[in-house]
């Protein structure tokens, strides 16, 4: 019984879900008229995936469908289609397009990598789900688009008179417009149909004829057409957009089957072949001239291939290629994008099949343009040999370390001369030759470089090809020293140490002292000793010296040592003046320096001359800049204010619309009465004090009949202003209405039992009425079905206890 209950609830969600592709077919409360034969493949696929994801079968959902009026025969049809379903899902996109854009059929197809035919050239074109050649979903209404049954037109009249309707072209090719009548538009372009519709409406609406109202016609939804694909990996009948092309349909079918051709695909229309498609034209040249648009009842036939060959080895794109009659090996080589850089191009080895056995043949490069490959050939392109016949190398402290050509009788001095001689830092006592012996093992030969270059023939060793001569540098044997400078310096960082480096030298190298530098400098130096001194706990030796911050050239010039760390301290008091801004209804608006660390809003407004006579005492607020990390926190935080979702989303939107500032409401009347009031907040640099001008109106917006501003009437409450704008619309959520006061503070409507408490309305405030969230109610049949299941479950429990 538990399984039956679960099945029922699942299928109710299947029939009522807004995202279900089957909704258009099964959303009716009465399923007695449903014809399973009319359900699209996407409807069947969607129902099947829902059942699979919830680990249930169609048999478990039978009682729910029958309770909604589905006949037993139609249920058996549905069961049969679910068991045989193997057609890729086709889904209609209902996402709203931009103005004037059409809704087109969005086709989805789960791609499975073709591991069996992965090497066939062109197969990757149909394995990639992002390359589907589908029509552009953001395409504007094409003026030359020919209308037909199934298309939807969006017709709008705007101006003095208003009219909006979405009208579908009937199977007879007509559209029916209220008060205008039926118009025949099938076979007409959207441009011609627009003119015809405009003229017909102008005959009824006088303001359209006079130009006071305008007519707009756009394509809302493009019709689908049926095409048949034979010889593909997934052959069958497909419903596609009327703007779909041949490549789009081939992609839906997964491309040619295992033995299908890529070079001779037929497009059949009215029982005649009107186009032969060679996919290699697109793959090799990018030529899409054969990618023509499809029409209703077109047939795409993919015959078996005639000739395929395999290319392996050093080509840029190895694989299996299909050839047409008369194409040569040179054409085949162009399909592979040519030889790779390391290919042996003098000849190519081919394995061919005879009637009894295999044979091997070599094709020289002079035969490439005339040799005709045979079906089943396997071509192997080898690498050139990875060896040199006359190479020798020198590296290290020479002016031109490199690889050079070797000649017999070459000695160490000859190779050094080719490299333009030794550098000044060359270590002359020793060099090294790395040599590969006849048995391919490596040996090292040491060279007395000084004697070899002085004319000593015995020291000037004879070289062999592939020898590598290494000349050492004396710098290789010295340690690299650094010093570090930090603090109030223009370019702090790590610098190279040189013998005799002083503090003055380093100050100049680091760009000089900053204006905030104090006279205190601390230098930390590492302790170097052969012995461990357990009585000395220090890890570094510290030097505290005084300098003249106004002069980089110090009288007492401190000599630095390797790895010293210098810190230039900051002056104890060095704060640049910082400002706040005052805008709005004050006598002297502008920027004001924070003279005190504890400057408050009342102090600054007093310096600005106080509020003017036009100022709104309840409209004073502070806009405080938000740092980058705070902005990120505002965008990511879950504002759990305990408010209704609609109100909370509105507040979040307001925060994100003005993420540069945080609003701090100020109660100016409280500050005037008591300057020590908590609302007299301390200001921070960058704050903007905004004083609003008194406004006698009350704005009313949201889900009301008329968004307007009503003059403030003392003593009048929330309901008065809602009535003044004509009341609420059908979607208004009155009990969650809220108000925003001039200083940025908000208040919401509260309710206790049946008593509602509305916030007080003040001049300059704004009343917002949010939209009521949508709710889905169960129909009578569904309530009866669920009730019967619950009753059966209760009976089962009672029986179990007995």
Image (cartoon, helix red, strand yellow):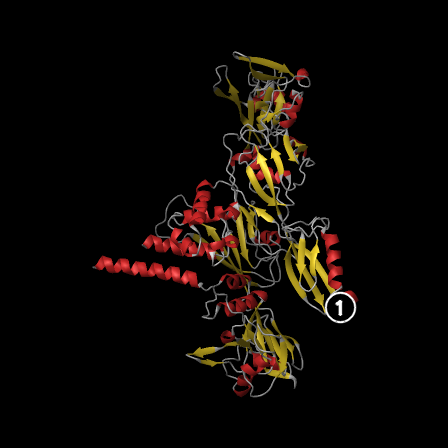
Residue 719, position as x, y percentages in the image: 54, 82
- Asked if residue 356 lies left or right of residue 419, the reply is left
Location of residue 474 in the rendering, given as x and y in whole percent from the top left corner? 55, 33
Placement of 783 over or under 536, stated as above or below:
below
* Mark 1 element type: helix
272 shown above or below 759: above
In front here: 735 or 212? 212
The answer to whether residue 572 is visible is no
Image quarter in which the N terminus is found: bottom left
Quarter of the figure that contains the C terminus: bottom left
- Decide: few, some or many residues near mark 1? Use Cα within 10 Å; few <14, some 14-19, many ≥20: some
The residue wearing badge 1 is 207
Which is more toward the observer, 105 or 284?
105
Q: Is residue 599 above or below residue 428?
A: below
Work out whether residue 101 or residue 4 is closer to the camera in this orientation and state it. 4
Point out the residue furthest to the right here. 210
Q: How many marks?
A: 1
**Residue at point 51%, 51% (across, down):** 21
Q: Quadrant of residue 394?
A: top right
When asked about the image quadrant of residue 729, the answer is bottom right
Residue 147 image offset from top left, x and y in percent:
68, 50
Does residue 354 show up?
yes
* Residue extending furthest toward the left: 802
Give percent across and percent down for residue 773.
50, 67
């Amino acid at each position: 019984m538990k399984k039956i209950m679960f099945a029922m609830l699942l299928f109710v969600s299947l029939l009522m879900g807004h995202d279900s592709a089957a909704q258009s077919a099964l959303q009716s409360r009465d399923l007695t008229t449903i014809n399973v034969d009319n359900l699209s493949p996407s409807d069947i696929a969607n129902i099947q995936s829902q059942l699979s994801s919830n680990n249930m079968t169609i048999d478990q959902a039978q009682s729910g469908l029958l309770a909604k009026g589905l006949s037993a025969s139609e249920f058996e049809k549905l069961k049969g289609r679910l068991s045989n379903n193997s057609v890729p899902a086709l889904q209609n996109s209902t996402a709203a397009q931009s103005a004037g854009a059409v809704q087109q059929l969005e086709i989805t197809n789960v791609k499975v990598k073709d591991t069996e035919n992965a090497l066939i050239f062109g197969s990757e074109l149909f394995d990639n789900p992002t390359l589907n050649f589908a029509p552009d979903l953001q395409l504007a209404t094409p003026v030359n688009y020919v209308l037909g049954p199934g298309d939807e037109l969006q017709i709008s009249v705007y101006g003095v008179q208003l009219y909006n309707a979405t009208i579908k072209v009937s199977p007879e090719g007509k559209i029916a417009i209220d008060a205008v009548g039926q118009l025949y538009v099938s076979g007409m372009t959207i441009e011609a149909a627009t003119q015809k519709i405009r003229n017909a409406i102008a005959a009824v609406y006088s303001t359209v004829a006079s130009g006071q109202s305008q007519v707009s016609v756009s394509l809302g939804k493009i019709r689908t057409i049926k095409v048949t694909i034979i010889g593909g990996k997934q052959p069958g009948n497909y419903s596609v957009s009327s703007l779909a092309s041949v490549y789009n349909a081939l992609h839906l079918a997964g491309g040619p089957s295992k033995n299908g051709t890529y070079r001779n695909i037929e497009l059949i229309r009215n029982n005649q072949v009107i186009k032969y498609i060679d996919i290699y034209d697109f793959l090799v040249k990018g030529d899409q001239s054969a990618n023509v648009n499809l029409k209703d009842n077109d047939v795409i036939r993919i015959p078996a291939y005639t000739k395929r060959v395999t290319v392996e080895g050093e080509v840029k794109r190895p694989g299996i290629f299909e050839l047409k009659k008369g194409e040569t090996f040179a054409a085949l080589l162009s399909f592979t994008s040519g030889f790779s850089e390391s290919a042996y191009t003098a000849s190519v080895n081919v394995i061919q099949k005879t009637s009894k056995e295999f044979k091997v043949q070599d094709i020289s490069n002079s035969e490439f343009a005339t040799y005709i490959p045979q079906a089943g050939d396997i071509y192997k392109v080898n690498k050139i040999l990875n060896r040199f016949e006359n190479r020798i190398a020198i590296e290290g402290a020479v002016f031109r370390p490199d690889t050079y050509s070797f000649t017999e009788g070459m000695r160490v001095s000859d190779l050094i001369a080719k490299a333009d001689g030794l550098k000044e830092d060359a270590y002359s006592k020793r060099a090294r030759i790395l040599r590969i012996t006849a048995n391919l093992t490596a040996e090292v030969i040491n060279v007395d470089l000084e004697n070899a270059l002085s004319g000593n023939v015995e020291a000037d060793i004879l070289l062999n090809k592939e020898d590598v001569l290494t000349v050492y540098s004396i710098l290789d044997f010295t340690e690299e020293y650094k010093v570090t400078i930090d603090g109030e310096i223009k370019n702090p960082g790590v610098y190279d140490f040189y013998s005799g480096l002083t503090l003055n030298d380093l100050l100049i190298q680091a760009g000089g002292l900053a204006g905030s530098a104090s006279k205190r400098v601390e230098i930390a130096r590492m302790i170097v000793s052969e012995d461990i001194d357990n009585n000395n706990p220090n890890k570094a030796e510290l030097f505290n010296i005084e300098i003249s911050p106004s002069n980089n050239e110090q009288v007492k010039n401190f000599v630095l040592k390797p790895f010293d760390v210098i810190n230039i301290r900051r002056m104890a008091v060095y704060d640049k003046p910082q400002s706040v801004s005052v805008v709005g209804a004050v006598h002297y608006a502008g920027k004001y320096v924070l003279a005190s660390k504890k400057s408050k809003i009342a102090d600054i407004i007093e310096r600005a001359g106080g509020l003017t006579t036009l100022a709104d005492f309840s409209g004073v607020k502070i806009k405080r800049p938000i740092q980058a990390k705070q902005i990120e926190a505002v965008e990511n935080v879950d504002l759990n204010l305990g408010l209704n979702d609609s109100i909370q989303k509105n507040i979040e939107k307001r925060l994100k619309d003005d993420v540069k500032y945080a609003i701090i409401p100020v109660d100016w009347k409280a500050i005037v009465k008591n300057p020590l009031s908590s609302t007299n907040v301390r200001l921070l640099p960058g704050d903007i004090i905004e004083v609003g001008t008194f406004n006698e109106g009350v704005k009313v917006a949201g889900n009301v009949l008329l968004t307007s501003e009503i003059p403030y009437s003392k003593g009048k409450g929330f309901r008065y202003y809602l009535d003044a704008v004509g009341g609420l619309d059908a979607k208004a959520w009155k009990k969650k209405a809220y108000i925003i006061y001039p200083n940025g503070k908000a208040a919401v409507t509260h309710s206790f039992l049946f008593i509602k408490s509305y916030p007080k309305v003040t001049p300059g405030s704004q009343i917002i009425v949010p939209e009521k969230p949508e709710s889905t109610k169960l129909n009578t049949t569904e309530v009866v079905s669920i009730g019967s299941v619950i009753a059966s479950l209760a009976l089962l429990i009672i029986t179990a206890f007995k």
